[in-house]
Amino acid sequence: MSIQTIELVRGKDRKLYPAGGPRPAAEVERLRSLTHSLACGQGLSERAAQRALLEEHGVRRSTGIIHRDLAEYDCGGQFGRPCKGAPAG
Ligand SMILES: [Zn+2]
């Protein structure tokens, strides 16, 4: 019998996640929603949203990922403004 140890890190939601692995789906969804709340709700640019994620939420994400999250997901204006990611036209 072997025992495998997995290093865990505690996420912002206080749940434990494997360190270094891909983010769990629920975490990905939470970050996507958070990104929209910054970009759509607060009107931040992608770059400003990236900085806010890092400085205010301790989350490091590339602008490419942020752009993709905004482009591929429509928050439907739930953060107070029309979604920046809404398809043009
Ligand atoms: Zn949005």
Image (cartoon, rainbow, N blue to C red):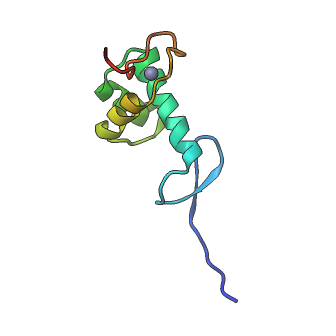
Residue 26 vertical placement versus 69 (above, below): below
| Quadrant the C terminus occupies | top left
For the point 54% across and 16% down, the residue is 78
For the point 29% across and 39% down, the residue is 64
Which residue lies most toward the top here? 81
**Residue closer to the observer: 71 or 64:** 71
Residue 88 horizontal/vertical position (percent): 31, 17
Which residue lies most toward the right here? 1
**Residue closer to the observer: 20 or 84:** 84
Residue 74 horizontal/vertical position (percent): 46, 24
Q: How many marks?
A: 0
Which residue lies most toward the front here? 89
Which residue lies most toward the bottom here? 1
Residue 49 vertical placement versus 19 (above, below): above
The answer to whether 37 appears left or right of 14 in the picture is left
For the point 52% across and 15% down, the residue is 79
| Quadrant the N terminus occupies | bottom right
Q: Quadrant of ligand 1?
A: top left
**Residue closer to the observer: 66 or 9:** 66
Residue 52 horizontal/vertical position (percent): 40, 28
Residue 54 vertical placement versus 25 (above, below): above
Residue 10 horizontal/vertical position (percent): 60, 51
Examine the image and state in which quarter residue 49 appears: top left
Examine the image and state in which quarter residue 68 appears: top left
